[in-house]
Amino acid sequence: MIFRSPGLEMDEDHTVKLSMGMVPENLKKQLAIAVRSVQWSYAIFWSLSASEQGTLEWADGYYNGDIKTRKRVPAMELKADELGLERSDQLRELYKSLLEDEIDQQSNRPSAALSPDDLSDAEWYYLVCMSFVFKLGEGLPGRAVANEQTIWLCNAPYADSKVFSRSLLAKTVVCFPHFSGVIELGVTELVYKLSIGAACGLSWPPDSLIVQVLDDSTNEVLRELVELECQKWIRKGVNVKYETRNNRNGYKAGALKEGLEKQYVSDCEFVAIFDADFQPEEDFLWRAIPFLLENPELGLVQARWKFVNADECLLTRLQEMSLDYHFSVEQELLASEIVGTAGVWRIQAIHDAGGWKDRTTVEDMDLAVRASLKGWKFVFVGDLAVKNELPSTFKAYRYQQHRWSCGPANLFRKMTKEIMFCERVSIFKRIHLIYAFFFVRKIIAHWLTFFFYCIVIPTSILVPEIKLTKPIAIYIPATITILNAVCTPRSLHLLVFWILFENVLSLHRSKATIIGLLEANRVNEWVVTEKLGNTTRNRASRKIRSCISERIHVLELVMGMFMLYCAMYDLQFGKDHFFIYLLLQSAAFFVMGFGYVGTFVSS
């Protein structure tokens, strides 16, 4: 979104000038409305400095985040918006007192004033922001003004310090020009708070609901924060059980297995599973449990995923297209597997199938296949959606796809014999599981995509004996691709990008399936998929050279060179114009090989 804003003027040399426009008197209330309507953590208005030309400084703000200590002069309860306005004023007064070195002069401060010990981490972040100034073109606010455009920044802790130097706590930030300055909105909420809050907010009789938080984190600071969040909900009357382990054996499967073995779970009949970035709606259980109550043969109710950050960048838009096809076609028609989270299991079905097993990295698929062999049925509820996030960095997405491709292939190797000799289900279902579910969908689909688009077509140019007719090379693949992409109508204009993206990923997925089938190195590799706010690492400690090395993906670059060579050869000697596709595909390999996809988003 690019627009010209009031208070912005352009010189003849196209440099930006800020004029001293009138700032609305009710700006703070306007900021409060904007922040609270979409649950941002804070809003800041950076205005043109009156003392230093060409510089933006703090003008006003509204705080909407966590409050550690509440202090006020009048002893009365305030509404949420009034509390935010009061807190914003208190933080501003504290900043002024610190700036004037009056913190020790308690007699000069009102009894309701704050001290540094009264602040939460988010309040400290808001306070520190007051000390920042930006020259035009520098930092996120300065760049938003200089470029006359709105700028979104996601995964702020990983941003270059030249882009965003305040990434101590903020996760997502947006800046847009407004009057004689810039309005900045930011989110500091950590993912675990959103998920725990959503789980504790589920509507269900309190005496029949237990919220179990399984924390496998090795970060002691994060563990303490999660435990504090659980204690907060316990004080509100929610039955929350916070469980940790002294090891990470079995990863997610190990944690789920130990969670079900707790004594207080013995009286429970159903278990709903949500990953750390999932936020179920309040009525989730009321809409899911009736299916299990009406049909005693039903072992699982699977909900759909709703992606809250699908518009974050091109990478997330393309992921949305792939997953929409999975839910709209594969799950809607087959309902043959749980997708790891956002599902409600009948605990009896879990025990009957042998419980959670950690022999592969797809414990959800493992359990679903074993349960189906025991005769349990599953249902997919397409209109029951649970909000969650898509990985917005290419590195995180590659790790996720490795696990999702390697795990099923490894499970196929381990379960083929068990499926073949299972007499409890029909021969038709056994053939379906082995051939259609595993062999075609989980293995051949990846190999066929890579082999045809990335090997056969380029090789047909170098080897004249290989002839590809237009129906084989163009019409049939195009028809299949369009049918896959039609599940996301709003992204049909990204169809070409999606095809190129899927072809590049087919290389990585094919390699992962081979690793799974052969049980080679990395077969049980488990890397937590990084989502918004999923990491607490300090960006400043990372070395520049390690960042560069992490961006380079050699296999993709080698394939890009191969595609480029074939394109140039076809351009010079060919007659079928395959070079058009090959040039586009080589560009996609290079873009993803150098890691230039995801991470930074501009509207």
Image (spheres, helix red, strand yellow):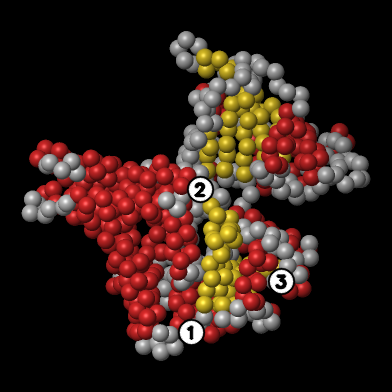
Q: Residue at x 79, y 45 (%)?
A: 80
Instruction: Say which mark, if any, is on residue 374.
Output: 1
How busy is the neighbourhood of tag 2: few (under 14 within 10 Å), some, or many (20 plus)? Answer: many
Comparing 415 with 168, the one in front is: 415
Label 1 – label 2 distance at C-alpha: 37 Å
Amino acid found under the numbered disc labelled 2 = Ala
**Mark 1: which secondary structure?**
loop
Q: Would you identify the image quadrant in which residue 447 lies?
A: bottom left
Q: Is residue 12 above or below residue 187?
A: above
Question: Relative to residue 365, is residue 113 drawn left or right?
Answer: right
**Mark 3: which secondary structure?**
loop
Comparing 66 with 327, the one in front is: 327
Task: Specify which label sits upstream in the sequence, 3 or 1.
Answer: 3
The picture places residue 330, in percent across and down from the top left corner, at: 43, 64
Instruction: Say which mark, if any, is on residue 310.
Output: 2
Q: Residue at x 41, y 89 (%)?
A: 423
How busy is the neighbourhood of tag 3: few (under 14 within 10 Å), some, or many (20 plus)? Answer: some
Q: Residue at x 45, y 12 (%)?
A: 13
| Residue 397 visible in rendering | no
Farthest top residue?
A: 12
Task: Specify which label sits upstream in the sequence, 1 or 2.
Answer: 2
CB atoms of marks 2 and 3 within 8 Å: no
How busy is the neighbourhood of tag 1: few (under 14 within 10 Å), some, or many (20 plus)? Answer: some
CB atoms of marks 3 and 1 within 8 Å: no
Q: Which residue is mark 3?
A: 209
| Residue 531 visible in rendering | yes
**Mark 2: which secondary structure?**
loop
The picture places residue 256, in percent across and down from the top left corner, at: 56, 73
Amino acid found under the numbered disc labelled 1 = Lys
Amino acid found under the numbered disc labelled 3 = Leu
